[in-house]
Image: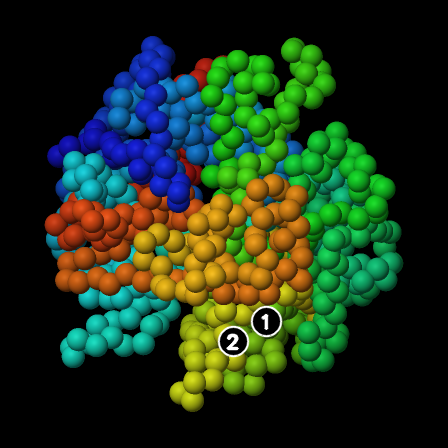
Amino acid sequence: MEFNRSIKASSCEESDLSGKKQEEKTEEASGFASFRELAESLIFALLLAFFIKSFEAEAFVIPTGSMAPTLKGRHKDIECSECGFRYQVNASEEMDSSTNRKTATRIVSGTCPQCGFPEYYGPDAPSFTGDRILVSKCTFDNRPVYRWDVSVFRAPAEPKVNFIKRIIGLPNERVRIQYGDIFVQKKLPSGDYADFEIVRKPLTNLQQMLQTVYDNDFPHKELVQIGWPSRWIDDLALQRKEQAAWIPSEDRKSFSFSGEVQKIDESVFGSRLNLETNPLPGEFDAKNASVHWLRYRHIVPSSFDWLSLMDRKLPDSVLQSGKIANNPQLIIDQAAYNTAIRQTSDSRDVDSMSQYIRKLPGTSAYGYRYQCLKSADSFGMNWTGDLSVSCEVDFKNEPFTDHDQLLFDLVKGGQVFRCRIHPLDGRITLEIPGIDKWVPEVVVHPLGPGVHHFQFMNIDEQMRLLVDGKELEFPNEGRYDHLCKPFANGQAGVLPRNRDPNEKDLIPVSIGVQNRKMSIDHIKIQRDLYYIATGNHLEAIPYELAEQLHKPEHRRCDRLSSVVIPSADEENYTKFLSDPVSWKGYGNTWSAIFDLQEDQYLALGDNSGLSHDSRLWSSNTVPYYVDRKLLIGKAFYVYWPHGKLIPKTRLPFIPEFSKMRHID
């Protein structure tokens, strides 16, 4: 068996959707870096020799970020200095993959996905080798290749180079990428194709692919104290009634309902500052008049806001206008991993740095400090309405009553998708309020007083619920794709896939309670991966729309809109995301179609915004598919995600066991 091979990457593997190749760098690696690589290799070889004896496997190192966040290439591991959230930023450019030598490029900044702070951590912040994984070379000899398998294969263009991607399309299928989802037509024995059907991710795959939108275990308490609005807010406080049912804890990590409405001071949820758009949803239907709601708004400080907020002051523009511009916003496919800002010189002279770095007066040893703007190259461009909300609910140790209810609402395209829980009899209902053609799905799952964990998802045209880690089985699996298709008479479905977002999408998540005293903690909102339709396989579209394909404003964006989506600068970009008037046509997307024959597979990276994969391979000499004979094996375990640094050194040899994990 071989254990010390690494996945090599061609320059195109590190390119973005424009396909631009990276320039090779020639700076010599330091003696320390060489020593570190040698020491790591010896340690990993010993570990593998000890643990792997009974099956054929091979070790690989992930070089780039095409599979992030599932698998990470060389990266910076950052703990946000503002909110404490830990995230990773791509640093593949710091090393030349063909020579394993340092380049002149340094990754000096990234943006926290939790609070939006664009942090400058400088050229000396360590970067870590990519995840070290194990690949089973015999899996595909003993079973078929399954959709969603993370697979290592020889690159179609360069058979001596190994790539790692997720298998999305299978032999004898026609695959469509549209609306961020994957649709498949099966080939029939007659040679014709069946109708396109959306394909869903099994739970184990989905949980690894979900990306954090907001984790309330990391609230920014200081911002609320100076008057910045809280993302989670009680519905009564949102309507400025100087009262609330849901009250935050002192650390703002949890909320409680005492059974009655309380009078509050405005500072509980931040100041009375207006937002650019201030939707007031009220009650979505009359049946819930006695339900008290806790609402989420995606309020993200801009780079310019942070210039003041980092000093715990409200921006002058906010104080003068009484309004926070360009908030709340749609949830989009932005990924923290792609927010790197590059510095091409070790000089600390700001003139030699990126255009996104500013020198400010400060108290550092240099007499100044640096602050970053968010790089326009890192902006997510596609609205993502497939969401998940999870939390821990403490029902208190009191008997349940007939009136007790817990509700979760997720909004997509202006439509509410609801889970209603009656704790007394354990009756749980999936609802789509206002849609007559939807028959509520009901299961009975007994719940006792005390603490329970819930996760409600609206992903891939399916509602799913997990209670205490177990997925409940609803009669029709919570699927509603039959409502999205055109009917037999040619009429559009009642939930057309191309529906535009509206003001309700600015409050995309709500948690409701009726009667029952309870508290909720560990609230987390996540989004599904968004597959961008791009490349040489786009379906034909009208000429006037096709022209937009070549405009820089639409790079990385497959959404069509009546307004050109401005990506050149942050102010106009975020203005679009907060302005429902501009969203006409934004529900429409381009689509890409791929035909697969026998022994042909479609391979896509999880980091859809920065992955050179099947969407971009096609040329006169390079196929867009992976032939069966090029498959090496299935990735199944991250055995070394990179260690913690030994104190007072840069040696990452302390294992992080919590990040060693199975790959799904």
Any part of residue 262 in sight? no
Q: In this view, does 12 lie above or below 94?
A: below
Residue 395 lies, in percent from the top left, at 65, 62
Residue 138, image x, y percentages: 14, 48
Looking at the image, is 652 positioned above or below residue 493?
above
Residue pictured at 53% horizontal, 13% vertical: 347
Looking at the rendered structure, which numbered label has been put on residue 306?
none
* Scheme by which the image is coloured: rainbow
Q: Is mark 1 on a helix, strand or loop?
A: strand
Q: Is residue 164 above or below residue 148?
A: above
Residue 415, disc: 1
Q: Which residue is more in the foreground, 410 or 464? A: 410
Residue drawn at the location 33% of the way across and 44% of the way down: 612
Disc 1 versus disc 2: distance between alpha carbons?
8 Å
Can residue 584 be seen?
A: yes
Residue at the image position 84 percent from the left and 60 percent from the top: 240
| Residue 180 placement, left or right of 260 | left
Asked if the residue under mark 2 is in contact with the one under mark 1, i.e. CB atoms within 8 Å, the reply is yes
Q: Quadrant of residue 42?
A: top left
How many other residues sit within 10 Å of disc 2, few (<14), some (14-19) or many (≥20)?
A: some
Q: Residue 181: x and y, percent?
A: 41, 62
Q: Is residue 349 left or right of residue 129?
A: right
Checking the image for residue 495, the label placed there is: 2
Q: As shown in the figure, which amino acid type bears the numbered disc 1?
A: Gln
Which image quarter is the N terminus in?
top left
Q: Nearer the viewer, residue 536 or 109?
A: 536
| Horizontal and vertical percent position of residue 221 | 72, 40
In the rendered view, tell whether residue 22 sits above or below residue 529: above
* 518 and 178: which is toward the camera: 178
Where residue 55 sits, quadrant-wise, is top left
- Element assignment for label 2: loop
